[in-house]
Amino acid sequence: MSDNAKPSFAVGITGASGALYAVRTVAALLEAGCHVELVVSDFGRRLLRDELGEEASLDRLTDYLAQRYGDGVAAGSMTVLNNRDVGASIASGSHACQGMAIIPCSMKTLAAVANGLSRTLVERAADVMLKERRPLIVVARETPMSLPQLRNMVALAEAGAIMMPAMPAFYQGPRTLDDLADFMAGKVLASLGLPHELYPPWTG
């Protein structure tokens, strides 16, 4: 299947803690047969290396995903875009990108998107999702949160974004960090309208 025939989603990785959430979400989208348009900020690049090791650096990420999550990631495809290229594909509403997740989302990026700054590709792509009324999932990662940060979250929610702080549940009985990452990735996929089996549904 060509990239054009696959559902396409953008993923932004910025410099907040939570690299495991990011790579699990990218892997889950690939396993679902999607095309992922990946944008990583400078601090996001450092985050991947600092939290997951050099083998997860951006230039090795495809191999890392296959090694960690298996051959299922080959069902999808991925394009890596430069965060400084504000003229890249996902910077335009005419591009057929069906939704976006920023995971994790730093407070700096959160503030920029909430105020429509669009200085980088992550920020511009998020702005496109809002103006085109497409799903924008913002996985904010900070604690405790200041009043300005909370106000920025409210502003984004009012603009149509889905605010999804990195707060995995425990009802599913997680035993490993990967189980927690599965939960957050599953929440992102569900909010993008994609079926998954990353965690069991609550049955009451």
Image (cartoon, helix red, strand yellow):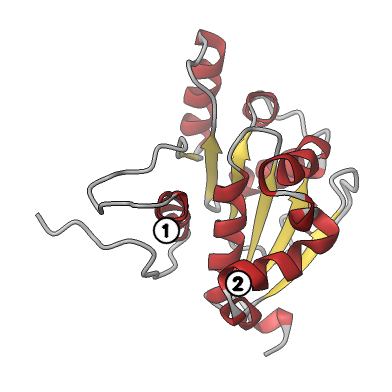
Q: Where is residue 192 in the image (x, y as percent from the top left)?
A: 48, 59
Exactly how many numbered labels are in the figure?
2
Q: Which residue is drawn at 75% across and 70% down?
A: 63
Structural distance between the alpha carbons of marks 1 and 2 = 13 Å
Which of 59/102 is in front? 59
Which of 64/111 is in front? 64
Q: Residue at x 55, y 21 (%)?
A: 152
Residue 199, visible in the rendered structure: yes
Where is 188 relative to 148, above or below? below
Q: Position of residue 194 (x, y in %)?
A: 44, 68
Marker disc for residue 65: none
Q: Residues within 10 Å of mark 1 (few under 14, many from 20)?
A: many
Q: How crowded is mark 2: few (under 14 residues within 10 Å), some or many (20 or more)?
A: many
Q: Residue at x 79, y 39 (%)?
A: 46
SS at circle 2: helix
| Residue 81: quadrant of the picture | bottom right
**Residue denoted by label 2:** 30
Q: Residue furthest left?
A: 204
Looking at the image, tell me whether mark 1 or mark 2 is earlier in sequence order: 2
SS at circle 1: helix
Q: Which residue is drawn at 90% across and 43% down?
A: 84
Amino acid at dot 2: Leu
Which of 189/47 is in front? 47
In the displayed structure, does residue 42 sit left or right of residue 23? right
**Residue denoted by label 1:** 186
Q: Position of residue 48 (x, y in %)?
A: 72, 46
In the displayed structure, does residue 91 sit left or right of residue 203? right
Residue 92, visible in the rendered structure: no
Amino acid at dot 1: Gly
Q: Position of residue 195 (x, y in %)?
A: 39, 70
Of the 4 image quadrants, the one containing the N terminus is bottom right
Of the 4 image quadrants, the one containing the C terminus is bottom left
